[in-house]
Amino acid sequence: MAQMIAEWAIQNGFNLLDSWRYRRSNEGRTVTIEIKRFSVVLIDERAGVRPQIVSTLFKDLFFGSPNGKLERLLLDR
């Protein structure tokens, strides 16, 4: 499951920082994806606003379409 998230991150413009951490910056927004053992953490940072941190378990993320849920996590922030 972690590999699927890593592939999705690369396909969607995220740069690899180190093992299981990806980051994308654009329009004053920086989004970091950290892939943990059983979950994925999304850190959304915008200038002048407190960072938003969302964590979800793989089992919850992969119930249904994983790509759609990753995109919704990003767009809902």
Image (spheres, helix red, strand yellow):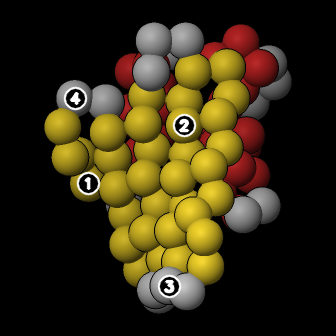
What residue does disc 2 label?
41
| Residue 41 placement (x, y as % from top left) | 54, 37
What residue does disc 4 label?
19
| Residue 72 placement (x, y as % from top left) | 74, 52
Q: Compute the Cα span from label 3 to label 2.
A: 20 Å
| Residue 3 at least partly seen | yes
Amino acid type of the residue that numbered disc 2 sits on in the rendered structure: Val
Q: Earlier in the sequence, mark 3 or mark 1?
A: 1
Dot 1: what SS? strand
Q: Nearer the viewer, residue 14 or 41?
A: 41
Amino acid type of the residue that numbered disc 3 sits on in the rendered structure: Ala
Q: Compute the Cα span from label 3 to label 4.
A: 26 Å
Amino acid type of the residue that numbered disc 1 sits on in the rendered structure: Asn
Query: Where 9 falls versus 40 (above or below)?
Result: below
| Residue 5 placement (x, y as % from top left) | 48, 31
Question: Mark 3 or mark 2: which is in front?
Answer: 3
Question: Mark 1 or mark 2: which is in front?
Answer: 2
Are the residues at dot 4 and dot 2 in contact (C-beta closer than 8 Å)? Answer: no
Q: Residue at x 55, y 46 (%)?
A: 42
What residue does disc 1 label?
15
| Residue 18 placement (x, y as % from top left) | 18, 37
What residue does disc 3 label?
47
Neighbourhood count class around disc 1 (C-alpha, 10 Å): few under 14, some 14–19, many 20 upward: some
Question: Mark 3 or mark 1: which is in front?
Answer: 3
